[in-house]
Amino acid sequence: MNRVRNILLCVAALSAGCADGKPLGGPLFAPSGGGDDDAYTILLYMSARIGHIDEVKSMKLAVEKNTGWKDLTVVHQEGSSALYRGSYRTIEDAQADLRATKEFVSAEGVRPFLGAILMPTPGKEVGPREWNLENAEGVYTVMVAVFYDMPERNYVGRKRFAADYCKQLRQAGYDAYFFHGPARSAVTIGTFPAEAVGETREGEQTVPVIRDERVRTILRDFPRLAVNGAGERVRTLDPRTGKYEYVDQTTYVIRIPRKGADGFPTNDRSGHP
């Protein structure tokens, strides 16, 4: 079996995961709206195995030879490489190529790109720099929204959605910021100094003590945490009854993450006064 056929058969296993390559989900779709030039692309394959640079470079040559596609791109990042097809301004613009990509049948009679997905162009800056929470002054802010991609529900573009919501809040007069973590994007409001929020212990948890009325105002204006544009109920243990119940997830105070932060800003408690 030659190398080209090996590569194409490896790609065919995308939806189940191929060796050390990362498995991919189904088709993606998101609410329509304005987009930047080349805002989206089609992900064909991603690998984080040792030797991923040479692997994906070879895959690009093999795919070009067997499909005739001339719009393939390889992107190398620290620890992984990926193969993409095309560039599109909007999600709607990509639908025809996405369908054709998924329906392509190789000489072996398999559909090697059945797991192809549409995603934002990698490395593209999303949102103005001055709205990025990592660049904000202060110690605390209030988390009001979270966005993440959900392939199983045809929902993608969490960075764009967070930046767009940040823009809406600013147009409404709120000092809003976005934060793009490895898998989720957050939207927060306000920046506050260390003395605006204290901390105390309740059992095994550290909880905030609100000292600034501006923080209280934001928490009152935005009582529910927006998750992908809607509210979310979470299962939690009521310490008074000892029973689990579903409650609305609330907004909360977080420390402002600094540049290069690996984690996503979270807090176990709402921070309500």
Image: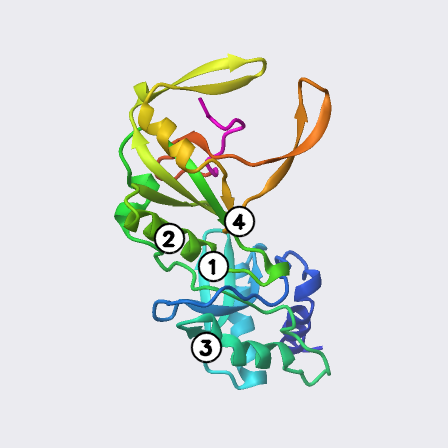
Question: Which residue corresponds to mark 1?
Answer: 157
- Residues shaded magenta: 263-273
Q: Is residue 268 magenta?
A: yes
What is the C-alpha distance between the residues marked 3 and 2? 21 Å
What is the C-alpha distance between the residues marked 3 and 4? 26 Å
User: Which element is circle 1 on?
Assistant: loop
Q: Earlier in the sequence, mark 1 or mark 3?
A: 3
Colour treatment of the image: rainbow
Question: Which residue corresponds to mark 3?
Answer: 93
Q: Can residue 252 be seen in this view?
A: yes
What is the C-alpha distance between the residues marked 4 and 2? 16 Å
Q: Residue 186 at x, y = what percent?
A: 44, 44
Q: Which of marks 3 and 2 is nearer the N terminus?
A: 3
Q: Are marks 3 and 2 in contact (CB under 8 Å)?
A: no
Quarter of the view holding residue 239: top right
Q: Which mark is residue 272?
A: none
Amino acid on which the number 2 mark rests in the picture? Ala
Q: Nearer the viewer, mark 4 or mark 1?
A: 4
Q: Residue 21 at x, y = what percent?
A: 62, 59
Amino acid on which the number 1 mark rests in the picture? Gly
Q: Which of marks 2 and 1 is nearer the N terminus?
A: 1
Q: Which of marks 4 and 2 is in front?
A: 4
Q: Can residue 256 be seen in this view?
A: no
